Image (cartoon, helix red, strand yellow):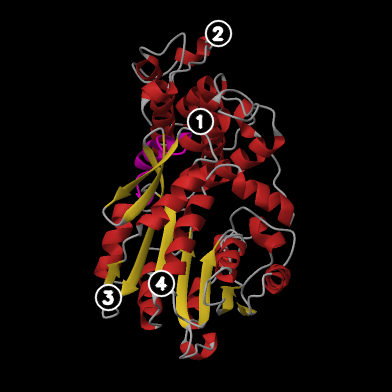
Amino acid sequence: MKAELRANTTSISLQNPRLFNTPQNSLPGALRGCLGSLDGACIEKLLLHCASALESNDVTLAQQVMWVLNNVASPVGDPNQRLTSCFLRALISRGSRVCPTTLSFNGSSTTQRRPMSVTELAGYVDLIPWHRFGFSASNSAIFKAIQGYPKVHVLDFSISHCMQWPTLIDALAKRPEGPPSLRITVPSCRPPVPPLLNVSTEEVGLRLGNFAKFRDVPFEFNVIDDPSSATSSDLLSKESSSFHFESLLNNLTPSMLNLRDDEALVINCQNWLRYLSDERKGSTDVSLRDAFLDIIKGLNPCIIVVVDEDSDLSASSLTSRITTCFNYLWIPFDALETFLPKDNSQRQEYEADIGQKIENIISFEGFQRIERLESGSKLSQRMKNAEFFSLPFSEETVREVKSLLDEHASGWGMKKDEDMLVLTWKGHNSVFATAWAPNGLED
């Protein structure tokens, strides 16, 4: 995040004389040049100062910095205040495991999340192009890759409850040679992250089937059963360790997936790889993320689409994660400010979901920290190392994505970075889309 893009400042009142009863040049040093107002750069400096205090177990100093941040944080304020509220809550959560505190902070509350209806989920996805960008780029690339195939099987790994597929079904229905038969397979195992849905995966499949029938597209929907998976209502109440992705990988075999020789296999990864651990258990073992890529490569798909947020949040250092996260997740807060009032409930729920992401990034370590984003450039190198080759996006895909962005605020844009499409907000990368195929399947 560039300071000039967040020029709005927040006045604060530092009336607590105990605030400066700290080791020489500690908190005063953090506030030097910031008194009277706090812009993004000063807030970031305070967050890092608080994180350093927590890491050195200096609870007194951490609480004093939190007190200053509390004078800025507000879940219904300007974008700086709202973002600070989320970070303060995450730091309080982390600090509470060092020393429980009875202090009450403005930023310590968040909107209670609940599962959405299908209609509410559609509105959630349409709010900003964070998800729709990936849907549009992926569907266009998939449509091109399956040209001429009478049967298509999509293996879908995503967190958006199949919201991507009505648009593809509609496009297939208009194919000049007639629509192919479409089979979609989804895992029952899902990361414990929002958005949550108040209907089952099977119900989602029934709704997709009804839409496909209406559009005269032959359709089949399957769920990869996994006894260790949980229902959507359980997702926020269980530890991430309850989600046995290792078990899922064991089920990704041609026989378990009922792969058929006459089908074009498509593998779709939307905001998914980040939830597969990249930690290695031994010197010779591969990570779960690399094991997943190796498995799907062995399935010989005609295309693999990978879409995710374009930021590197995998660092082991807390201060590094705070800096990267703060300079990245200002984007949705700033974008929502352009068209929704501060007290809008839909905006507050969307920001609460971002706050949950921030809390996991900042408050947790080890396998409890499941938000492990890597940038588009790192993902591309990982795919090449796994012996995939990049499929460039066509000019038609570029036009379709640009047409989608025209429906949103003028700050959204798109750029091509080698064979990768990148969604931008005011010139800053937010989401990337890539397409791949196993080596040996070149045209």
Between circles 4 and 1, the one closer to the viewer is 4
Q: Tell me which corner region of the image, top left, top right, bottom left or bottom right, holds residue 236.
A: bottom right
* Disc ID at residue 99: none
Residue at horizontal 47 percent and vertical 88 percent from the top: 254
Q: Amino acid at mark 4?
A: Ala
Residue 309 vs residue 228, the one in the foreground: 309
Residue 325 in view of the camera:
yes
Pointers 3 and 1 in contact (C-beta within 8 Å)? no
> Callout 4: 10 Å neighbours few (<14), some, many (20+)?
some
> Callout 1: 10 Å neighbours few (<14), some, many (20+)?
many
Residue wearing tag 4? 145
Residue wearing tag 2? 15
Question: Is residue 21 inside the magenta stretch?
Answer: no
The stretch of residues the image draws in magenta is 313-330
Q: Is residue 204 above or below residue 40?
A: below
| Image quadrant where one finds the N terminus | top left
Residue wearing tag 1? 334
Residue wearing tag 3? 284
Q: Amino acid at mark 2?
A: Gln
